[in-house]
Image (cartoon, grey):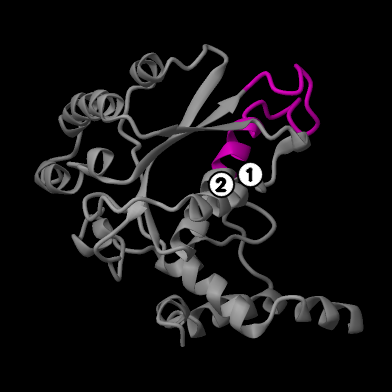
Amino acid sequence: MEKVEQQNKDISTDERKGLYKTIFSRRDVRNQFLDTPIPDDVLSRILYAAHYAPSAGFMQPWDFLLIRSSETRKKVHAAFTQAHAEATSMLLPGKEQAAGCNFKLKGILDCALNICVTCDTTRTGPVVSGRPHVSTMDTYSSVCTIQNLWLAARAEGLGVGWVSILDEKTLKEILEIPDHVVPVGYLCIGYVSHFLKKPEMENDGWLPRLDIRNLISFDRWHGQPERSEAGILQQLKQDADFPAAAQEGE
């Protein structure tokens, strides 16, 4: 127990609160970007945070393609516009109008920087520890680096938007990405006019925040808790206001 207490002291109470505040105030930013440049020292810290993500077999499959060229961004925005039109036609009735408002994504053009995070499926060779039975572990690792980048950016006062509506083949052609490399995330990053209190799609009534207690099973899929395990569900109920309070720094 003494060792656990000592490890807890490695991160102070204020540092722990800062981490939770960053997590709960992170937002997917679309259209409120400013064109203020990102200082090199800030960008350096964010990239280091991203690079220190976990990876299967320590393969570190990611690369970071920094995109400032307005010409390249215009091509990516055009590709997004085409993909968005195709995606909107597939939405359920009643969602099309909301999608038209929410997904204009001028941020591709307006933000200080675009970053494409990729996954090199050949890095460190054909056999990687942790990947023989789950071949997509390299992609999952690259997603981890995006989460690190996103949280570090928020801690630095920067917004990030993940452009998920893009045709992969078109994007690879625009950015000249080789065949064995997969574009995992195309990100807009920059200073913003404001951060929303809630995710934009939640604010707009697209979907509600799911109750985490309905997403937890015990020992098997949809397994029910034993009496001794029910405490965590009660604790989650008591802590329902924790995300909002942490976001406010309380």
Which amino acid, by three-letter code, is at mark 1? His
Q: Which mark is residue 47?
A: 2
Q: Quadrant of residue 247?
A: bottom left
Q: Residue at x 25, y 56 (%)?
A: 201
* Residue furthest to the bottom: 250
Residue 85 x %, y %:
16, 28
**Left or right of residue 70: residue 232:** right
Image quadrant assignment for residue 27: bottom left
Dots 1, 2 in contact, CB < 8 A: yes
Relative vertical location of residue 36 with respect to residue 212 in this rendering, above or below: above
Quarter of the figure with residue 157: bottom left
The residue beneath circle 1 is: 51
Give the x, y percent position of residue 1.
Answer: 89, 82
Question: Which residues lie in the magenta part?
Answer: 121-144
The answer to if 7 sits in the magenta stretch is no
Residue 134 in the magenta stretch? The answer is yes
Picture coordinates of residue 87 (x, y %)?
Answer: 22, 30
- For this view, does 136 lie left or right of residue 40? right
Q: Alpha-carbon neighbours of circle 1 within 10 Å: few (<14), some, or many (≥20)?
A: many
For the residue marked with disc 2, what is the amino acid?
Leu
Placement of 240 over or under 39, stated as above or below: below
235 relative position to 194: left or right:
right
Q: Nearer the viewer, residue 240 or 2?
A: 2
Q: At numbered mark 1, what does the secondary structure look like: helix, strand or loop?
A: helix
Query: 10 Å neighbourhood of mark 2: few (<14), some, or many (≥20)?
Result: some
- Residue at image coords 39%, 58%: 158
Q: Nearer the viewer, residue 103 or 124?
A: 124
Compared with residue 245, is residue 21 higher up or lower down, i.e. above or below?
above
